Amino acid sequence: MRLLLINPNTTVSMTEKAAIAARAVAGPGTEIIAATSQMGPASIEGYYDGAIAVPGMLRELKERQVEGYDAAIICCFDDTGLEAARMFCDVPVVGLCEAAVATAGFLAQRFSVVTTLERSRILIDNLVHRYGMGARAKVRASDIPVLELEDSSSSAIGKLRAEIERALAEDGAEAIVLGCAGMTDLARQLQSIYGIPVVDGVAAAVKQAEALVSLGLSTSKRSSYASPLPKSFSGAMQDFAPAAASA
Amino acid sequence: MRLLLINPNTTVSMTEKAAIAARAVAGPGTEIIAATSQMGPASIEGYYDGAIAVPGMLRELKERQVEGYDAAIICCFDDTGLEAARMFCDVPVVGLCEAAVATAGFLAQRFSVVTTLERSRILIDNLVHRYGMGARAKVRASDIPVLELEDSSSSAIGKLRAEIERALAEDGAEAIVLGCAGMTDLARQLQSIYGIPVVDGVAAAVKQAEALVSLGLSTSKRSSYASPLPKSFSGAMQDFAPAAASA
Amino acid sequence: MRLLLINPNTTVSMTEKAAIAARAVAGPGTEIIAATSQMGPASIEGYYDGAIAVPGMLRELKERQVEGYDAAIICCFDDTGLEAARMFCDVPVVGLCEAAVATAGFLAQRFSVVTTLERSRILIDNLVHRYGMGARAKVRASDIPVLELEDSSSSAIGKLRAEIERALAEDGAEAIVLGCAGMTDLARQLQSIYGIPVVDGVAAAVKQAEALVSLGLSTSKRSSYASPLPKSFSGAMQDFAPAAASA
Amino acid sequence: MRLLLINPNTTVSMTEKAAIAARAVAGPGTEIIAATSQMGPASIEGYYDGAIAVPGMLRELKERQVEGYDAAIICCFDDTGLEAARMFCDVPVVGLCEAAVATAGFLAQRFSVVTTLERSRILIDNLVHRYGMGARAKVRASDIPVLELEDSSSSAIGKLRAEIERALAEDGAEAIVLGCAGMTDLARQLQSIYGIPVVDGVAAAVKQAEALVSLGLSTSKRSSYASPLPKSFSGAMQDFAPAAASA
Amino acid sequence: MRLLLINPNTTVSMTEKAAIAARAVAGPGTEIIAATSQMGPASIEGYYDGAIAVPGMLRELKERQVEGYDAAIICCFDDTGLEAARMFCDVPVVGLCEAAVATAGFLAQRFSVVTTLERSRILIDNLVHRYGMGARAKVRASDIPVLELEDSSSSAIGKLRAEIERALAEDGAEAIVLGCAGMTDLARQLQSIYGIPVVDGVAAAVKQAEALVSLGLSTSKRSSYASPLPKSFSGAMQDFAPAAASA
Amino acid sequence: MRLLLINPNTTVSMTEKAAIAARAVAGPGTEIIAATSQMGPASIEGYYDGAIAVPGMLRELKERQVEGYDAAIICCFDDTGLEAARMFCDVPVVGLCEAAVATAGFLAQRFSVVTTLERSRILIDNLVHRYGMGARAKVRASDIPVLELEDSSSSAIGKLRAEIERALAEDGAEAIVLGCAGMTDLARQLQSIYGIPVVDGVAAAVKQAEALVSLGLSTSKRSSYASPLPKSFSGAMQDFAPAAASA
């Protein structure tokens, strides 16, 4: 089984860190193919960055079809372009936020998601509501810029721990979800410090993608995720036009 | 007051039809500047088309800043890229769906939105829930491809009327919202046929944009719509990088 | 266009203050007709006051029909008698709370409403939920009696600012809605102090009423807002009996 | 124990029918005092009628304080003026809709409310949501004018049975709530025909009022139901001004 | 009327305390039959205890059928086995939590439930949501083990008061619901201290059970509470097999 | 990795069918240990059967601890005793309904669950709401007694197909979840007939259990799933008393 781990931002070090986390939990027959978007922002902090990142991610999804993959994982906790990718791909596509909160739901009745900047907090809160966990999960920001997570000398871990401790004290959280792909390397350590489940989206998404492939399940093509209709695309986007096909 | 009416798809005839509708309701001091995206799909039918359309729309929003505008209207009922545009712009940005359902809320306690294809139905239903009208509104598809609305000889009006009649019979709808920018020219006629309010998103959005400008209100830059942070953008997207500025 | 601004309490100074606010934002062709209820409480603080205020407001709506108006605005943040007025009138009727929260929805994903007394807080919270903004807005009381807002020497502004600051610190509010008609003169000042959108219901309602009239839209008479059925009314209320008519 | 059964419309025959139903279920020590509003509409069909009915009902609640009562029941399924009455009274006040749906909740997980006219359906649906039963109950209209229920030769029972049968077939209803005070005499008969619980609001409210009195519980005067504040009331409403007192 | 008060835990002193509370509010013709489960845990603190308690409670419900009862009350605030009991019994069955929150709903728009241990808090919060009061009620734990309530020298009352005071200060609670059967003797005292309604589940359930019996209403046997189907039961549970009957 | 597949009903043929389904999807290093409860009902149809089944299931969970298992799967779509099992076990426990709807959520925005009898429909609908999928999923009954699924000559498949076709026509379902463990052998066939994802709970639960074990995640012992407190258990249940331990 080949899983494409596609980082929708263009920071290769973040892709590599995520790939390590993915390979650490992948099953024996699973190959992780790590890919980094070639066009777009260096990190995704809020809606604007996310919107500009999507075409680069979709292009990568398309180009990687030549070598083939059995499922794709969008390696950003905002689930950047997830719905578009599901329409585009014939194989399952999994987002980190969706996978992480579904996983946390098997472990706890109430949990808190700790993300980076305040500007991402409501975006993720909206996702959590759409995924059906709004009544069970609270989303918090820890005031860490995304790229600061790439710098091991930063104060990021301290800020993250402080926010987790507030979640335990104030939210009655039974588990923690780390709300950024760049936090993937911290999950085990934090779980051991706090003695409650700490869910990392990268690892969770790998297992969900493996599950869907093993089960022979893929995105429904009835209604909202139907394949894009053939039509003309203009300007710099013309090569995104879908070939006449499915429906 | 100058309102930028930006069509995120590249079909100029649709922009022109919307501009006529916008000018028909604009206040005496309001100038409607109609703009069409230069890159992306010819129509927006589902998430994939929408995602590819956003950069072209954002580029147009940027280029039009030279001549200036007081508010922008995104002329697609999917509210394509609305959040990204709100981060990008310092002036108010209004979406058709958001404006139309807010307007319908002043007229009726329960209403139905009639859109084009089944693939857009759930997308719009999700928007309607997020805008807080999920308990008051039902979304229906009428099986009309978007560009068929540009062809006056098509059977589109018949399909639309059939779906409105089902909404009246089955949903207890007290008003109808037309769920596609391309239906803008049909609102008055349908209102007169059915004797209940028929809300068109283009017209509704013009009045909401005028209202915000008149009231001296613009998008909050605290938290979710804060201006994009300066950072590097790669490849074909590099000119989307925000200049170092706000926060 | 003639808009009837009807104050459902009997305090003329409050009507006058609201009329100033309304005229300050009204469009060039809009005439604001300010009216004060002739019977009922001097201020509306909770359900009891509101219930007694409604007949006086409806009588004023009726008597003003002689000179005519194109839409009515109920000038109390409790949206006193809004549904009854919508059944009674053939023209659009707009409430302050409904207009203000709809307007805030275009500016922010999360916001706080700051009202006067604790006894009005839950009443307004219920309205906010019914208007679909329950998941996006928090309602707070600032412990200011309504008529204290008419006294410029009072400590009202201080209490209001303290509560706004709590909303910013504790709710993650991105915008503020002023939850009383008597606060209308404070909106611009507070917006400039806090640098986030501050929405006043009087001004918001004027623009929504203008919008509906411009768009040729009025209250649906199908189902919940159908015109009152002719029937006998007894005692002091007999002149409220609707003439045999509509449906 | 003395329970005041106050009919907020002015139709004495309806009060009498409700009093019979109330006495049929009242406990041994309970006296039912039936009262009819002296001013307002002959029946309550929609928001306008309801709003005009409230002052007459509140006046009756006040005048009956001379002889005294231990709790009050507002004898209309719209729960006309319930919140205002709760502020006014120092004793518990119970509404028919609130009592009926709470009672149905002990008997069934899903149920349907069958009311009279379409114009009351959404009003009651909003109540049902506010009382927390929105996810468990569906509201239906049977197209019966309220006063037709006073005419035993009418086709009302046939229309009501047809609607109940639709609720059983289409809603998966496990119980039925009769959504009008005027249907009180039909509950037992319909229960015996359909073999499922049929809840009448008049009877349900009597038992809830008795329960509250027996338990020594009355309306909280903290926050939303605090006693009306003393203030001036003008014109025909001046005698509704509360005496300086409580808080 | 004979009401069976069945304690699903095996602590007789708790049954006796509840029986005193029940008899104190029972109507003149009501006999309270107090029963204690013969098998299961000494107290119910969380899901595991509750699950093991159910068969003992159902056995008691069955054995008491010989002498007969008109309704049953499950005397634990977790509403232990309530749905199973409703399927099993032909008479109404009432739970403490369900009765208490329904009763509080007639007295206050917002209230707080104060229960014992943190491990029961989310369990009860889930019940409160299912009963439709999730938007109106907050659930709090006071860190009191259930059996500590049986020891009058314990610090339980102090912890309970501290938590009630937090509910008043932080939740805007208008009433308090005591979230454990073992707190039944404290309700009147706490109500007098705090001057707001304090609802005890045991007392509330007695009145609801009396109400249902008086009204001739019993659990719907259509759909979710249909009588158990006859089938074989194995091992130690074989005597729980329902006789061939109903449907 | 050893997964305990525990059937909470006592029908061995159903355990065996589920074990075949489980082994068909289990990863290379996963051993499926199939266990059948030794006491309780032959099938679980509604709350009563479920309540009686839990102790037998918990006993089996305990006895199997001797040989050891890394996670447990409760093999009934009602998620019988899931919360109790999570408190009892130190390893992850997964329910079929919870696993199936989480899995469907990665494949479709809207889906329908088709279960057996009407008496299980609302029970499952309540679960689906609690798991956060209430706004995305509709639950349907196909009128098939559970044990009829064990009889290959029955009309079960025909009834199931008819109900799936209604879901496609009326619900706009994009995927189907089979709502009974006994349907596990039909999933692939139905998926191939209808061309949309058909999710089987047994298979879905195996992959979720494998995922949790691989990720080093187990049930949070903070708050609602804390280990049972040591206390005395009486009568036939005395061996269910937890040893003095955890917390």
Image (cartoon, coloured by chain):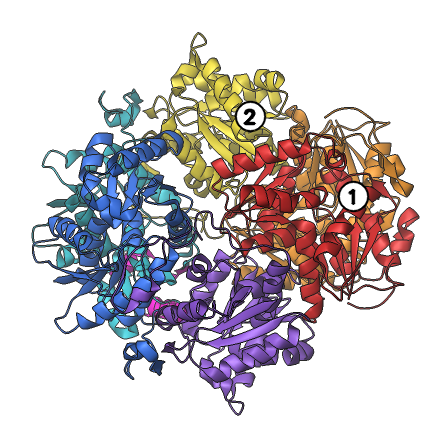
Chain colours: A yellow, B cyan, C blue, D purple, E red, F orange
Q: Position of residue F169 (x, y in %)?
A: 53, 63
User: Is A73 located above or below residue E16 in the figure?
Assistant: above
Label the magenta part by its dominant secondary structure: helix
Query: Mark 2 highlights which residue?
Result: A168
Residue at image location 35% in from the left, 62% down from the top: C51
Q: Residue furthest bottom?
A: D153
Q: Which residues are magenta?
A: B139-168
- Which corner quadrant of the image does residue E47 belong to? top right
Q: Secondary structure at mark 1?
A: helix
Residue at image location 68% in from the left, 33% down from the top: E156
Q: Position of residue D35 (x, y in %)?
A: 49, 76
Q: Residue furthest top?
A: A153
F85 relative position to A130: left or right:
right
User: Is F209 located above or below residue C74 in the figure?
Assistant: above
Tell me the crowding category of disc 1: few under 14, some 14 to 19, or many 20 or more residues within 10 angstroms, Cα based.
many
B134 relative position to D214: left or right:
left
Q: Are marks 2 and 1 on the same chain?
A: no
Looking at the image, which is closer to me, C80 or A213?
C80
Query: Mark 1 highlights which residue?
Result: E14
Closer mark to the observer between disc 2 and disc 1:
1
The C terminus of chain F: image quadrant: top right
Looking at the image, which is closer to me, A236 or D43?
D43
Q: Position of residue F23 (x, y in %)?
A: 75, 37
Residue at image location 52% in from the left, 28% down from the top: A170
Q: Is residue F44 visible?
A: no
The N terminus of chain F: image quadrant: top right
User: Is B144 located above or below residue D75 in the figure?
Assistant: above
Alpha carbons under labels 2 and 1: distance apart: 33 Å
Amino acid type, label 1: Met
Looking at the image, do the residues carrying marks 2 and 1 touch, with CB atoms under 8 Å apart?
Answer: no
